[in-house]
Amino acid sequence: MGTRERYEPGAFSWVELATSDAAAAKDFYGTLLGWEYEDNDIGDGGVYSMGKVDGHYVGALYETDAPPHWSSYVTVESADAAAEKAKEHGAELVAEPFDVMGAGRMAVVQDPSGAVVSLWEAKDHIGAGLVNAPGGLSWNDLMTHDVAKASSFYCALFGWEVADVEGAPGDRLVIRNGERLNGGMATIPDEAGEDVPPHWLPYFAVEDVDRAVAAAGDAGGTQIADAMDVPAGRFAVLADPQGVVFAVFAGNLDD
C-alpha cells in the first residue's frame, strides 16, 4: 500500500476538486472511489471536504462558482522560489504565494502551454497520505497542444526527466522525478478538438476499470473515452455529474 509521510520536491502530492455541487460530488466520489469525508470550515460559509480511504487523506473537494475542475499539486521546497522560477521560465502566476493556515504555503501557475498546476510547500499537511492504492491518486497526465514547450518548462522548473513512450501514438512522454515515475505528457487528441484547454488529468486507482465505468454511469457520470489496455494495466476516462474529467486505472501500481 502506497502510504506516504513525506514527498520529494517535484512529486505530485495532492489533488483537489473545485465543483459546482459539493454534496453531489461527495456522493459520486464516495460511491466510485470509497471516499469518506472530513469537513473543514474555511470561513464565509465555505467547507473544504478532505477525502479519506482507510483513514488516510487522498484528496479534497469544495464548492465554488468557478468552472468545475481538478487541481494537481506538486511539492516544492519553497512556494515563493518555485513561483519566481516558474515566471522566469515563461509561466504566468495565477495566484501569488500564500499561506494555507498552518497546513502549508502554495502558489498557482499556468505553464507556457496553458495548463495550470499548483505548487505546495508542506508544513503540517504533506498532501495525500495514501497514493497508488484503490481510491487514491495513481498518475497525472498533462494533456496539452504543445508537449515540447511544456516538457521544457517542467524539466527546468522541477528537474524532471522525460522520455518518449515507445509505440505510443502522437507525442507522449513519461515523467520521472528522481527514481520514481511521476506521470506523463501527451498531445490532446485531434478528435477532442482545439477548444479543449491544456490541463493536468488525474488518475485514480480502482480494483476493476470496467466495474468502475459501470458504477460511474449508475452514479450519474459519463464515459469520455473507451477503456483501453496499456502495458501497465487498463484505464478509462470519465466525467463526474458536474462534467469534470478524470481517469480511473487498474493494474501495476508503484508502492
Image (spheres, rainbow, N blue to C red):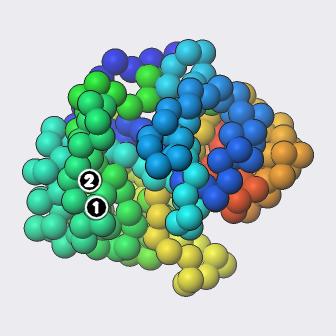
Separation of marks 1 and 2 at Cα, in angstroms: 5 Å
Local secondary structure at mark 2: strand
Is 200 situated left or right of 237 in this image? left
Residue visible at 26% across and 30% down in the picture: 102
Q: Measured along the vertical axis of the image, is residue 126 above or below residue 113?
A: above
Residue visible at 12% across and 59% down in the picture: 85
Residue 107's label in the rendered image is: 2
The location of residue 145, given as percent across then percent down, is: 44, 76
Any part of residue 212 in sight = yes
Residue visible at 60% across and 22% down in the picture: 53
Look at label 1 and name its amino acid: Ala
Residue visible at 50% across and 74% down in the picture: 197
Q: Nearer the viewer, residue 186 or 105?
A: 105
Look at label 2 and name its amino acid: Ala
> Which residue, given by chain and number where applicable, does mark 1 sit on?
95
The location of residue 59, given as percent across then percent down, is: 51, 36
Q: Nearer the viewer, residue 15 or 46?
A: 46
The location of residue 174, given as percent across then percent down, is: 40, 50
Any part of residue 209 in sight = no
The location of residue 25, given as percent across then percent down, is: 69, 46
Is 122 situated left or right of 25 in this image? left
